[in-house]
Amino acid sequence: MLELKNISFSAGDETGIKHILSDVSLKINERFVAVTGPNGSGKSTLARIIAGVTAPTSGSVILDGEDITDMGITERAKKGISFAFQQPVRFKGITVFDLLSLASGKQLSVSEACDYLSQVGMCARDYVNREINGSLSGGELKRIEIATILARGTKVSIFDEPEAGIDLWSFSNLITVFEKMYERINGSILIISHQERILEIADRILVIADGKISADGSRDKIMPQLRDSSRVCGRITDKKEGCA
Amino acid sequence: MCLMDKIQKFLLEQVADLHGVPAGAYNIRSDGKMAARNTTANIDIVTKQDKPGIDIIIKPGTKNESVHIPVIITKTDYQEMVYNDFYIGEDCDVVIIAGCGINNCGDQESRHDGIHSFYLAKNAHIKYIEKHYGEGDGLGGRVMNPTTVAELGEGAYMEMETVQIKGIDNTRRKTAATLAENAKLVISEKLMTHGEQYAETEFSVELNGEGSSANVVSRSVAKNKSRQLFLSKINGNSRCTGHSECDAIIMDEASVSAIPEITANSVDASLIHEAAIGKIAGEQLIKLMTLGLTEEEAEEQIVAGFLK
């Protein structure tokens, strides 16, 4: 179980100090938890704090009863936290196969690597030896990013807006990927998303606004509120047409 | 093959991926002497009479054959200058693997300077692979100054891959090529320097023929206090295309300079140069660390991938 206790994060610039997250506490034990809310509300910061990429100003992160707040990225990864970037990183010379092998922590066979790629709807044969460089499209990079998380198979998997930058055709495949992942996962998925179809898979939905949790509950409880809420609902219905 | 000790065998593996006698034609030079040679029906190797070196003569139409010409040096305080000339007949399609390994355990300089000249006849195609490797515990410098001169005839195509990953203290590499009509040159250079090493690489390409093209790509990593200088000069003298690219990762207290120069002497010449130098992107390190690698392991993977 992942637990956040009184997490706050502030960042300062020439205009003063901005409070990105304020005293956020939550426990995550469900299989699939979606985090939504307006842009700039602190969702990505929350994900980065869990992965150890960003250090909180105050508060603690607990994984299975162990305080991991002071642990670095590598140590947290080894403890079982995976993090899919909103904007996947490109590497000159490192192939899809290399990255999947690194993610799995062992030398994969080609067929194992292909299996992960197939799970994200990619024709494995075409991609396994491709370099993760500018020759891949945004959508392809996103799916490879998700495949690395599948290859890791850790107890907590965090996805930061997996739908961002994915075209409509790829998006319906992406939903299928998450539906399948839901069936297979042994741990928890924490997914930051604006997409109604992703929220609809979730067991639980957290809404973050202005650095605080403004709503938290089961999908059945939160979805009607989101649809009624002028601020968030506007975003969801805007995108609903696109995800059909 | 004459008797070789462990060091010589190891160097051969490093520079030529050879674990034994290669297939096809070969000439192995060890500490200034010919250690082994083999010729084939289509590939002749002749020792020069007027100066150190060999002539490699490949008959027109020779296809799918290879020539290995590794050089190894295990002596300290040894310098040599070698001239190797390659005559590639029309319509050939061959692979040439050169390379030099130096093991210098002494305190004096060991140095290999080589001038490789290629004459490609009409429509000849060669893939030329060159690897450099140095090792040894002594204080003596390991120095290599390879020069490659290539004359590409009409429709000829030369692919050149050079790799210098480790252990050469000082290198000045010069590559000069002239291209006739529809000739094509593709050069890929991989270079890594560390310690206080210095590496200078200079490409000079004359695109003389209509429809000729050149693509010169260098990827390098400079670690510790090492220094690198990349010079690339492409002259477009007719309807032609030229592209040069220098992409370098700089680490620690290293220094890298890239000086690309392109000159169009024809209105139909299309020339591009790109040069980028920078440290490893923080996001790349973070991504690999989220996969469970330490920062050092992530750095190793990124560098290894970049130079692969």
Image (tube, rainbow, N blue to C red):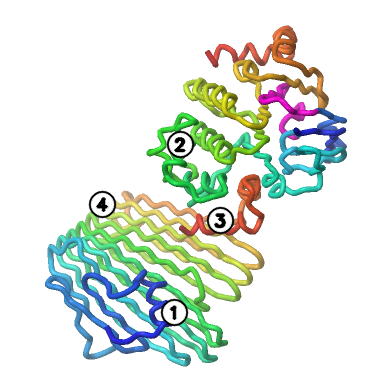
Residue placed under numbered mark 1 in the picture:
B144
For marks 3 and 1 on the same chain, the one whose residue lies earlier in the sequence: 1
Amino acid beneath label 1: Met
Along the line of sight, which residue is nearer the eye, A50 or A151? Answer: A151
**What's the distance in space between the residues labelled 4 and 1, CA to CA?**
34 Å
Q: Which mark is residue A115?
A: 2
- Residue A41 inside the magenta-drawn segment: yes
Residue B113 in view of the camera = no
- In the displayed structure image, the side of residue B122 where residue A126 appears, left or right: right
Instruction: Give the secondary structure at mark 3.
Output: helix
Residue A37, horizontal then vertical, whole percent: 73, 21
Badges 4 and 1, same chain: yes
Question: The disc labelled 3 sits on which kind of residue?
Answer: Gln
Q: Check residue B177 for magenta coloring.
A: no
Q: Which chain is indicated by disc 2?
A: A
Amino acid type at circle 2 is Asp
- Residue B155: where, in percent of width, then height? 20, 57
Chain letter for the residue marked with disc 4 in the picture: B
In which image quadrant can residue B244 be found? Answer: bottom left
Q: Secondary structure at mark 4?
A: loop
Dot in front, 3 or 4: 3
Q: Which residue is mark 4?
A: B211
Frontmost residue, B217 versus B47: B47
Disc 3 versus disc 1: distance between alpha carbons?
28 Å
Let me know if marks 3 and 2 both belong to one chain: no
Quarter occupied by residue B144: bottom left
Q: Which residues are magenta?
A: A27-45
Q: Nearer the viewer, residue A101 or A144?
A: A101
- Indicate the chain on which mark 1 is placed: B
